[in-house]
Amino acid sequence: MRRTTALPAALLAAALLALTACSPEDDKTAPAPAASTPAAQEQPADDADSGESSDAERAAGIPDAPTGADRAAYLAAIKAVDPRIVEDEEKAIDAGRNQCSSLTGGGDKVDWLAAQRFGNDARPLTDAQGKQLNAALRATLCPA
């Protein structure tokens, strides 16, 4: 029974870290948190890859991972902004699911957050591209 309470707590902590990980006040020199936690090690791999949001993720505005035609539509929509975004499809889906949480919460930096979340040092994105990504997300993965 310990596992059933530890897993939701770990997922909630991960969701909260994901929400705070892209704030403008981030210290770029701070080390990233360890990816492996006891709860993550206990979780079977097939549950981790199911794509279904936990209750904590749903509460944070993170939708299920898209499948089938929905997945294809989402990837095509963000690929239209920059084809390199979908080179790693799973990363693109994770970024989109997390960005949905930012869109649900609102704020005045959602375009910047999208650019940060989908871009990287080798392929930086502009706030204008972030705005296009948010429009693509609203049309596919996380409608308002």
Image (cartoon, rainbow, N blue to C red):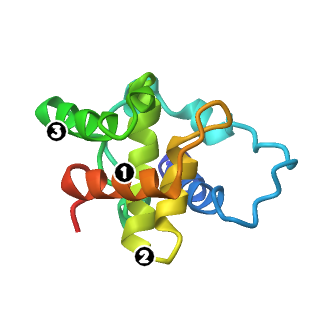
Res 59 quadrant in image: bottom left
Residue 131 picture location, percent across and down: 39, 59
Q: Quadrant of the C terminus?
A: bottom left
Task: Identify which residue, 73 or 50, lies in the foreground.
Answer: 73
Residue 66 picture location, percent across and down: 24, 39
Which residue is pictured at 21% across the width and 61% down the height? Answer: 143
Which residue is pictured at 54% across the width and 59% down the height? Answer: 113
Res 82 quadrant in image: top left
What element does badge 3 sit on?
helix
What element does badge 2 sit on?
loop
User: In the image, what residue type sits under mark 1?
Assistant: Leu
- Tell me which numbered mark, 2 or 3, is placed earlier along the sequence: 3
User: In the image, what residue type sits under mark 2?
Assistant: Gly
- Tell me which numbered mark, 1 or 3, is placed earlier along the sequence: 3
Gap between marks 1 and 2 measured at Cα = 15 Å
- Mark 2 is surrounded, within 10 Å at the Cα level, by few (under 14), some (14 to 19) or many (20 or more) other residues, namely few
Residue 22 picture location, percent across and down: 63, 57
Which residue is pictured at 20% across the width and 33% down the height? Answer: 67
- Marks 1/2 in contact by CB < 8 Å: the verdict is no
What is the number of the mark on residue 70? 3
What is the number of the mark on residue 106? 2
